[in-house]
């Protein structure tokens, strides 16, 4: 079975509803996954925009999600430590948790939600950066899933 990531709010390649952007409530979208590999100890999620004018813009860093978890409801609190033990890193808005799409006017931007199944829990503090997470995940990734949404102003 392959790790698969979906959302009830939008399909892969489709527009992200305004509710989940800076122009709306700026809530994180609901995410659902299946096919978590055997041996998974935790999950990590990164959302970023490779089309940002200054280079890839990080919208969400989330790690140490429990392995048995199969979804995130919309509007994950922006706390550093979640009730389920997961920790949130700092996004490029310099805030903890999710920061929704906020591209400049013009062409649509792509937002990649990347879920990683890991064979360990990570010893990172809340507020860790995407680079910190990527470094800590090296040699621990058992599977990956991607979901891409677009947004345009």
Image (cartoon, helix red, strand yellow):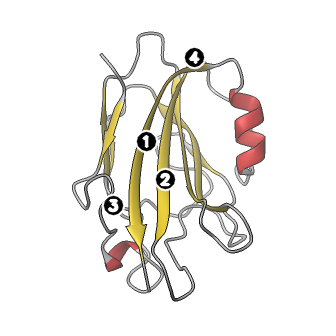
Disc 3 or 2, which lies upstream in sequence? 3
SS class, disc 1: strand
Task: Give the residue number, with chain letter if any, for mark 2.
Answer: 112
Location of residue 53 in the rendering, given as x and y in whole percent from the top left corner: 68, 74
Task: Give the residue number, with chain letter if any, for mark 1.
Answer: 146
Disc 1 or 2, which lies upstream in sequence? 2
SS class, disc 2: strand
Q: How far apart are marks 3 and 4 (CA)?
A: 26 Å
Task: Give the residue number, with chain letter if any, for mark 4.
Answer: 119
Q: In this view, does 80 lie to the left or right of 54?
A: left
Q: In this view, does 15 lie above or below 139?
A: below
Dot 1 and dot 2 residues touching (CB under 8 Å)? yes
Dot 3 and dot 4 residues touching (CB under 8 Å)? no
Whether residue 16 appears in this view of the structure is: yes
Q: Disc 3 vs disc 2: which is toward the camera?
A: 2
SS class, disc 3: loop
Front residue of 82/61: it is 61
Location of residue 115 in the rendering, given as x and y in whole percent from the top left corner: 48, 38
- Image disc number at residue 74: 3
Disc 1 or 4, which lies upstream in sequence? 4
């Amino acid at each position: 079975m392959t790790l698969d990531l979906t959302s009830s709010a939008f399909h892969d390649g489709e527009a992200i509803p305004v509710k989940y952007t800076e122009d709306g409530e700026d809530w994180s979208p609901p995410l659902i996954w299946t096919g978590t590999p055997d041996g998974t100890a935790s999950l990590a999620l990164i959302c970023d925009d490779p089309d940002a004018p200054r280079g890839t813009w990080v919208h969400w860093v989330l790690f140490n999600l429990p392995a048995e978890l199969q979804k995130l409801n919309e509007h994950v609190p922006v706390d550093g430590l979640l009730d389920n033990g997961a920790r949130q890193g700092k996004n490029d808005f310099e805030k903890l948790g999710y920061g929704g799409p906020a591209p400049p006017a013009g062409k649509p931007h792509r937002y990649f939600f990347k879920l990683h199944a890991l064979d360990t829990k990570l010893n990172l503090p809340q507020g860790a950066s995407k680079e910190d997470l990527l470094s800590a995940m090296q040699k621990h990734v058992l599977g990956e899933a991607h979901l891409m949404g677009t947004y345009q102003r």
